[in-house]
């Protein structure tokens, strides 16, 4: 026994030896919860003489399960092999393999992945004659998954949402989908836990077998459990009541995945006689980092209050830096990385950059790439490799060059246009036989006997032709907006109504920022030059060394990890916390927990950054510094005094970074800030917040007809255009809800521009 508890602190020892009855271990960040779980299992086997097969330990990841098993094996040897240890899903599959025939499935059942699910959903949509443009496979699957997380069977789902046309339709699809799954002897990911519960509750002999078998139940990361997972562990522990759960209510950040924070908050109510043990000694962070974390999280309503402490050195104060914009922010990050690597001999793998949204990675990627610093993205693709970005680039490439068959094949059905694989194969064959592009084949489909293709692709051809005529009239950012709007691409994403779709729309908004920055840096720009610039930016030749790369990831992806140095970027109101959470207390508290998680990933150095202005989602805005930063006492932040200066000096004049990546110096030097606040002074044309806060508002912006006074434009008038320079108006004529202006420019000749896009200045 002595060996098992040697090296544990008093609270850890108490958690290990408290084996009987329900036990709730509130394990603060970096407090050694994995050590407690492994030693408790070893203690049960070696000291309490519990058979390994009478213990079940449930985790959320295979990595965590394997790590625990390896640790236990080192302590007790091969006996660890007889433990039931794994994720919720892996354990449930073991039960299903034995008893799934009780609910009408064969033991050789399949588990359908996302691709299989989509194929099945498409079949259901077709059979039910449901419009797949209004009910996309992704949107339907997302809604069905939500229903399953609430443990709603199809009949229950239809009853709950009776009277809601969209959800009633999805209920019918859900019903047929489950029928087809069964016909295929298949389960999807959500079915695994739900069917296990069904078998246990409907079969007394199976229930008796497993409740007798599992005399001790242990669950990791309990704050992340959903309704179904709670029910499962409650059932398994129902006979003996020996259940130990480990978690931290301050790290509950997955409500969007169905996690229910009340599971941990109500544990002692659900399991009477619960012993509560708090692990408050932190072994990861320095003292000052921990003080900052405690100062933030105390602002949350907290049933299980705790205050982490550490025996580690106080260390350096967390640093705060207020940048001019996102590129200055990224440059600051790179400077600190280079400094610590050079002066303190850190490796690239010692650094992580954490952000709230994937779209924030672009500016950081740009600077890292240009400084030849290896990096890797965790939990997301590199910006230019994301599907929606590749799609919009493919549209632009086809507009620029209709011979680009690769781009055509990519976006001909994005969004859906009813041109299937067989048709595409025929088009490609005709293209090769006649030595013409696939675009030309489709454009002249009738000539080649492709009448069905013509019917389905007419709108697509007309769209590309229209945009081709406008590519020299519109700026690149305006061309992108037109493309997203008239193609229906953004509308299709909006109809999905899913977290993934909203994230994709955010990335498209960020792509507008790419175009705007290109226009600012290169006054005389063309679509061809823009595409070339994009291609070169995304063509990364340097090898990403997984062992020595700077890590970029969202805060959600960082849960459970630790790094010597952490950069928390984008700490402004509207970004973190996001606009959707402001005013919603529960959502705001979860955002604060997410910030707390970010802080406590840092072992030695913590850098917090925010920007005076940020161009994101295609719009420049000026937002106050995040309230979460303000919750950290001034004396705990290095650099706070710098942000309180009446005037902020231009930090780029003698910088090795900064504006060499964009010629926008004139836009920086005039900004001044109030001494005691982070709001921009009145003389700065600041916006109240981001222009596009939701998918709906972004879509509206694409469709919006800007109000303008057309009477100010007259024939013979001299005007200035930011791209074409000075010119004379020849003619003004109405076109739909807009006006077309004929202009003879001094340098580039005759152009026809739409008034709402032109941005003309009268000279």
Image (spheres, rainbow, N blue to C red):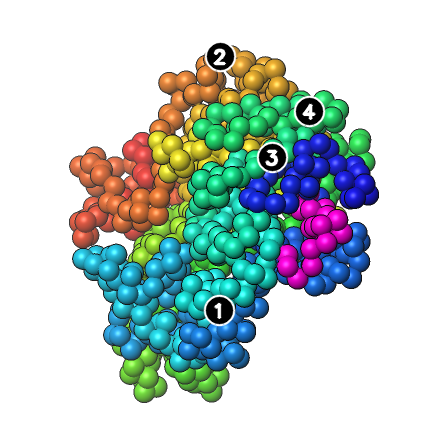
In front: label 1 or label 4: 1
Q: Distance between the residues labelled 2 and 3?
A: 45 Å
Question: Which residue is rendered at x = 37% and y = 66% of the image?
Answer: 137
**How far apart are the two marked residues, 4 and 2, measured between alpha carbons?**
30 Å
Disc number for residue 277: 3
Q: Which mark is residue 675?
A: 2
Q: Is residue 279 above or below residue 696?
A: above
Query: Image quadrant of residue 125?
Result: bottom left
Q: Residues within 10 Å of mark 1 (few under 14, many from 20)?
A: few
Secondary element type, mark 1: helix
Q: Which of marks 3 and 1 is in front?
A: 1
Crowding at mark 3 (Cα within 10 Å: few <14, some 14-19, many 20+): some
State which quadrant residue 488 falls in: bottom left
C-alpha gap between disc 2 and disc 1: 72 Å
Determine whether the residue tagged by mark 3 lies in a helix, strand or loop.
Answer: strand
> Does residue 503 appear left or right of residue 469 in this picture?
right
Q: Residue 457's x, y, as percent?
A: 32, 73
* Label located before the other in sequence (1 or 4): 1
Residue matched to label 4: 287
718 displayed left or right of 725:
left
First-in-chain label (4 vs 2): 4
Q: Image quadrant of residue 143? A: bottom left
Q: Earlier in the sequence, mark 3 or mark 4?
A: 3
Per the rendering, the mark at residue 205 is 1
- 245 in magenta: no
Question: Which residues are drawn in magenta?
Answer: 36-55
Residue 635: image location, x then y, percent: 61, 15
Q: Which residue shows up at 34% across the image and 60% down it?
A: 152
């Amino acid at each position: 026994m002595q060996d098992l508890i040697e090296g544990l602190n008093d609270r850890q020892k108490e958690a290990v030896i408290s084996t009987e009855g329900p036990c709730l271990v509130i394990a603060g960040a970096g407090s050694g919860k994995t050590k407690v779980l492994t030693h408790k299992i070893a203690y049960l086997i070696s000291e309490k003489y519990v058979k390994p097969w009478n213990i079940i330990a449930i985790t959320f990841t295979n990595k965590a399960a394997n790590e625990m098993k390896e640790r236990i094996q080192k302590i007790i040897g091969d006996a660890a092999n007889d433990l039931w240890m794994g994720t919720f899903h892996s354990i449930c599959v073991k039960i299903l393999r034995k008893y799934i025939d009780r609910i009408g499935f064969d033991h050789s059942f399949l588990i359908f992945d996302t691709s299989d699910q989509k194929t099945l959903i498409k079949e259901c949509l077709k059979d039910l004659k449901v419009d797949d443009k209004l009910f996309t496979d992704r949107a339907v699957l997302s809604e069905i998954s939500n229903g399953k997380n609430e443990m709603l069977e199809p009949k229950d789902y239809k009853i709950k949402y009776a009277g809601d046309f969209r959800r009633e339709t999805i209920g019918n699809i859900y019903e047929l989908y489950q029928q087809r799954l069964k016909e295929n002897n298949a389960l999807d990911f959500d079915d695994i836990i739900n069917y296990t519960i069904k078998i246990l509750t409907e079969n007394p002999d199976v229930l008796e077998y497993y409740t007798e078998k599992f005399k001790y139940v242990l669950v990791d990361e309990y704050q992340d459990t959903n309704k179904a997972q709670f029910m499962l562990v409650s059932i398994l522990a129902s006979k003996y009541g020996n259940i130990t759960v480990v978690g931290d209510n301050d790290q509950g950040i997955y409500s969007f995945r169905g996690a229910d924070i009340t599971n941990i908050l109500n544990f002692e109510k659900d399991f009477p006689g619960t012993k509560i043990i708090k692990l408050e000694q932190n072994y990861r962070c320095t003292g000052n980092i921990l003080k900052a974390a405690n100062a933030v999280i105390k602002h949350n309503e907290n049933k299980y209050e705790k205050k982490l402490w550490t025996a580690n050195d106080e260390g350096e104060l967390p640093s705060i830096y207020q940048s001019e914009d996102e590129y200055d922010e990224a440059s600051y990050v790179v400077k600190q990385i280079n400094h610590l690597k050079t002066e303190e001999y850190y490796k690239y793998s010692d650094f992580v950059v954490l952000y709230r949204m994937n779209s924030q990675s672009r500016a950081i990627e740009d600077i890292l790439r240009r400084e030849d610093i290896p990096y890797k993205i965790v939990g997301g693709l590199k910006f230019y490799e994301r599907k929606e970005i590749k799609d919009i680039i493919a549209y632009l490439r086809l507009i620029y060059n209709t011979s680009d068959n690769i781009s055509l094949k990519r976006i001909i059905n994005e969004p859906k246009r009813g041109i299937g694989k067989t048709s595409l194969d025929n088009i490609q064959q005709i293209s090769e036989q006649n030595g013409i592009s696939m675009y030309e084949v489709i454009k002249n489909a009738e000539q080649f006997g492709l009448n069905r293709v013509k019917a389905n692709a007419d709108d697509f051809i007309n769209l590309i032709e229209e945009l081709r005529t406008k590519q020299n009239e519109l700026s690149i950012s305006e061309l992108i907006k037109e493309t997203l709007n008239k193609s229906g691409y953004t509308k299709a994403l909006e109809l999905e109504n899913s977290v993934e779709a909203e994230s994709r729309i955010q990335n498209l908004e960020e792509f507008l920022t790419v175009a705007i920055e290109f226009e600012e840096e290169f006054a005389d720009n063309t679509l061809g030059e823009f595409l070339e610039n994009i291609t070169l930016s995304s063509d990364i030749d340097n090898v990403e060394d997984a062992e020595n790369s700077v890590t970029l990831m969202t805060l959600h992806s960082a849960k459970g990890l630790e790094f010597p140095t952490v950069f928390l970027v984008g700490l402004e109101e509207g970004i973190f916390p996001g606009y959707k959470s402001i005013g919603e207390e529960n959502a705001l508290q979860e955002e604060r927990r997410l910030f707390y998680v970010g802080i406590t990933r840092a072992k030695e150095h913590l850098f917090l950054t925010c920007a005076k202005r940020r161009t994101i989602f295609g719009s420049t805005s000026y937002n106050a510094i995040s309230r979460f930063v303000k919750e950290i006492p001034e004396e705990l932040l290095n650099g706070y005094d710098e942000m309180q200066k009446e005037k902020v000096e231009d930090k780029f004049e003698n910088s090795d970074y900064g504006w060499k990546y964009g010629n926008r110096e004139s836009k920086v030097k005039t900004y001044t800030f109030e001494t005691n606040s982070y709001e921009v002074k009145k003389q700065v044309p600041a916006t109240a917040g981001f222009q596009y806060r939701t998918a709906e508002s972004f879509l509206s912006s694409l469709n919006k007809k800007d109000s303008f006074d057309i009477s100010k434009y007259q024939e013979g008038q001299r005007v200035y255009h930011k791209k074409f320079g000075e010119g004379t108006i020849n003619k003004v004529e109405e076109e739909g809800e807009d006006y077309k202006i004929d202009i003879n420019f001094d340098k580039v000749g005759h152009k026809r521009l739409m008034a709402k896009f032109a941005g003309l200045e009268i000279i």
